[in-house]
Image: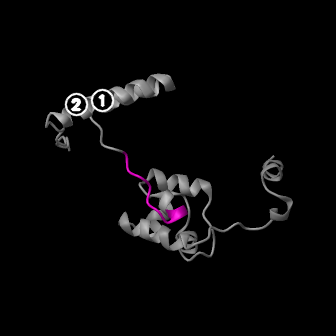
Amino acid sequence: MHNECAKNFAPSSMMGKNMHLAGGAGSRIRTERERLGLTQEEFGKLADVSRRTQAAYEADQNSPTIVYLEAISRSGADVWYVLTGNHAPQAVDMEAEDIRALDIWRNIAPDERNAALKMLMGLRDIRLDNGFYAAPRASAR
């Protein structure tokens, strides 16, 4: 069954070949491990791999599996960074009223969005014309 799945998703030229992540993923795995304050053995245990396998990943001698990447992600590693070299975007800190407004926005038709946007821009312009401006809200953090 496993070979059948592989045949369906991998070109025949790739069958039996190791696929490696490019661009220094190993050093990024090491960076994430060190950021989390773990040894190679401790980090490997999070994903059920040996210290030797962990070292091979970090030395770019072998590429990690999807299962490995999922496991280290659950443990706090930034897998987006490991794969791309860019840190994953952080969740936006929004207040309850912002979340409610966004939920409403996402559930209205495009023409209603255009009308709502024009109304909001008009309200903003009126406030600016009258010398009022919206001061940034203090963060709830």
Residue 122 located left or right of residue 51: left
Residue 135 located left or right of residue 70: left
The rendered magenta stretch, by its main secondary structure, is classed as loop
Disc 2: CA contacts within 10 A as few (<14), some (14-19) or many (>=20): few
Q: Which residue is mark 1?
A: 122
Q: Amino acid at mark 2?
A: Ile
Q: To which quarter of the image does residue 63 belong?
A: bottom right
Image position, residue 122 (x, y; %): 30, 29
Please tell me whether residue 104 belongs to the stretch shown in magenta: no
Q: Which one is nearer the viewer's eye here, 117 or 21?
A: 117
Image position, residue 113 (x, y; %): 44, 27
Q: Residue at x 32, y 33 (%)?
A: 121
Q: Which one is nearer the viewer's eye here, 124 or 11?
A: 124
Q: Which residue is mark 2?
A: 126
Mark count: 2
Q: Residue at x 82, y 62 (%)?
A: 15
Q: Secondary structure at mark 1?
A: helix
Marks 2 and 1, how far apart in space?
A: 6 Å
Disc 1: CA contacts within 10 A as few (<14), some (14-19) or many (>=20): few
Q: Is residue 75 visible?
A: yes
Q: Residue at x 52, y 57 (%)?
A: 47
Q: To which quarter of the image does residue 103 belong?
A: top left
Q: Secondary structure at mark 2?
A: helix
Q: Amino acid at mark 1?
A: Gly
Q: Is residue 100 visible?
A: no
Q: Quadrant of the C terminus?
A: top left
Image position, residue 61 (x, y; %): 62, 76
Q: Residue at x 45, y 22 (%)?
A: 112
**Image marks 2 and 1: residues in contact by CB distance under 8 Å:** yes
Highlighted magenta segment, given as a residue range: 82-91
